[in-house]
Amino acid sequence: MTRTPPRAREIRWGVVGPGRIAENVMHDFALVPGARPVAVGSRSLERAQAFAERHDLERAHGSYAELLADDEVDVVYIATPHPQHHAVALGALRAGKAVLVEKSFTATAEGTAEVIAEAHRRGVFAMEAMWTRFQPAVVRLRDLVEDGAIGEVRSVSAELGVQRRYDPTDRLYDPAQGGGSLLDLGVYPVSFAQMVLGDPDRVSAVGSLFPTGVDAEAGLLLGYDDGRSAALACSLRCALPGDARVYGTKGWIDVLPRFHHPQTIVLHRNHAEPATITLPQRGTGYAHELAEVTRCLQEGRTESDVMPLRDTQAVMDVLEAAADQLGVPLAEDPNVL
């Protein structure tokens, strides 16, 4: 007689910060079996209620603290401005709730370390929402690299930039809200390079600032003691192509724009014709990270193997080192909850 496998428990999601990225993420929950969004928290009850109505959520809370106290929420997706991630994530973990935290994970390396330590101390799941690592095309790239398809990997290049009209009242240009190109855009090329090459031994950064003091653009060179390197760039001043390339001793892999959520990579082996590999995402591309968190919670895991917390810390260390060299102060917002 064939036994029916037990049904995995439903994972109930809450959303903190009903902004643009949360709106995009919500559409992909329908593609993730076992995941059900049930609540949203905002500092504006009216805004929370409107978001809940648009997405058929059961409850709308007029503060972040109210959502964290909701006993019928298992995991919190944190999509507030960067400096608020630290306090909200700590509050969620202390309430026994798992967290999926938008990138950049926090505004400072110390803040990231504190969240990770709290997650480990309490044995509660935490993960950075770096959707790039879960894109099918990027998963295939990692498999090709690990299988030696391009030999020994020696270098990575990646850049991401958008041209935006300078507006000192906009979040992107406000230091109090974690503005600047590094935390919003630079996190992608840095995370990509760290995924392929590991933690760098040296970080060199050049760039320019907006009048508000946040970084307008940055060029980073990551150096490794064995001679490997990564050349990375981010910008709010210039539109950049948004591609990436991984170089090896037997060829290279192009990641076609935009590399942080690609559908196509091209494998170039020495003395062989290029091989184009196209692997579309599910939905808008967020379903893969949502599925990872849901699966990990159903299996009782406290960390993802695909986006481990040590990688999140390594990336934040690089971003902070670059910010320091550019003269950009980074700080957490302690007055969130």
Image: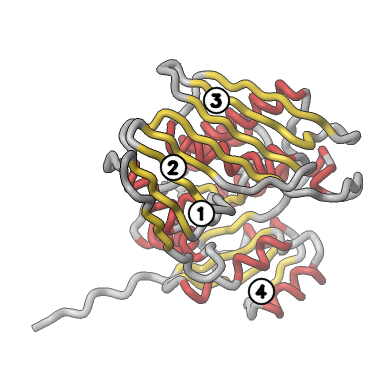
Residue extending furthest left? 1
Q: Residue at x 70, y 63 (%)?
A: 41
Mark found first going from the N terminus, 4 or 1: 4
Is residue 235 toward the left or the right of residue 228 in the image? right
Image quadrant in which you'd find residue 214: top right
Q: Which mark is residue 332?
A: none
What residue is pinned by disc 1? 98
Residue 320 appears in the rendering:
yes
Relative to 177, 121 lies left or right: left
Against 272, residue 74 (above or below) is below
**What amino acid does circle 2 point to?**
Pro
- Name the spot of residue 38 as percent of width and height, x first: 58, 72
Q: Earlier in the sequence, mark 4 or mark 2?
A: 4
Q: Secondary structure at mark 3?
A: strand
Marks 3 and 2 sit apart, C-alpha to C-alpha, by: 20 Å
Residue closest to the far bottom: 1
Query: Disc 3 marks which residue?
Result: 222
For the residues labelled 1 and 3, the Cα–Cα distance comes to: 32 Å
Q: Which residue is mark 4?
A: 59
**Eye-nearest disc, 1 or 3:** 3
Q: Nearer the viewer, mark 1 or mark 2?
A: 2
Q: How many numbered marks have been drawn onto this rendered protein structure?
A: 4
Question: Mark 2 highlights which residue?
Answer: 308
